[in-house]
Amino acid sequence: GAVVSQHPSRVICKSGTSVKIECRSLDFQATTMFWYRQFPKQSLMLMATSNEGSKATYEQGVEKDKFLINHASLTLSTLTVTSAHPEDSSFYICSAFQPSNFGSNQPQHFGDGTRLSIL
Amino acid sequence: DQQVKQNSPSLSVQEGRISILNCDYTNSMFDYFLWYKKYPAEGPTFLISISSIKDKNEDGRFTVFLNKSAKHLSLHIVPSQPGDSAVYFCAASYSTDSWGKLQFGAGTQVVVTP
């Protein structure tokens, strides 16, 4: 089945540091990738939709200058948390949308997530 | 505004018995629904889905029921196994949204006891 790799799985860094998280679709081309954030015991909240070759679309309330998204190729999207602060500590998950799968039973394939801890 | 709701944060069930997880939605435009299973520090794993043209879909131990008039769906797991202990998320999308954006519920923590 389709595989999405997310890296790193865990990051611990100091306040003020910028952190980059990578999301790769390993065996298919993903024109669209999604970035989610999950707080403890809460739902996955969609942050933004990343489209290959164009600007990301951010959900209401998500700071685009804080969470920079780049989707430079059909297999890679990156999320950079700029000048991270303790309140940015969370679990970030990406997913990749494979167009040929739309209408099949699973529109998105998820990575394993990144645990970000800002000290 | 939470459009997909899972009102039971947790469920404890004995091994071998049936687990029933519930999900309600408010947006009548949703026409595709999915259930995901998630372990801590991992991404969600797809379990089963259902289109709004159906009212039931079955895959092995997992069955999803959809009641469109009530805007309600449920996931039945029979028989429950210890490995089923995880958080289960209900998700919904529009078929007209070619990007496949998903709206998730808050999740239900299932614990299967021996």
Image: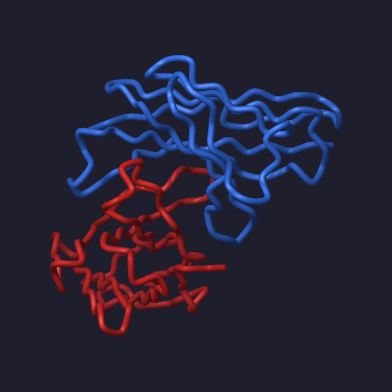
Chain colours: A blue, B red
Q: Is residue A102 above or below residue A70?
A: below
The quadrant of the picture occupied by the C terminus of chain B is bottom left
Tell me if residue B83 can be seen.
no
Residue drawn at (40%, 39%) of the image: A110
Q: Is residue A73 left or right of residue A26?
A: right
Picture coordinates of residue B61, whole percent (x, y): 18, 65
Q: Is residue A109 left or right of residue B4?
A: left
Q: Is residue B1 left or right of residue B104?
A: right
Picture coordinates of residue A16, whole percent (x, y): 86, 28
Count of residue discs = 0
Residue drawn at (64%, 23%) of the image: A20
The quadrant of the picture occupied by the N terminus of chain B is bottom right
Picture coordinates of residue A114, whole percent (x, y): 58, 35
Tell me if residue B26 can be seen.
yes
Tell me the quarter of the picture where residue A39 sits.
Answer: bottom right
Q: Is residue B6 above or below residue B101?
A: below
Foreground residue among A103 and B113: A103
Tell me the quarter of the picture where residue A108 sits.
Answer: top left
Residue drawn at (29%, 65%) of the image: B81
Picture coordinates of residue B109, whole percent (x, y): 48, 67
Foreground residue among B75 and A100: A100
Q: Residue furthest bottom?
A: B70
Q: Is residue A63 above or below residue B76?
A: above
Foreground residue among B37 and A45: A45
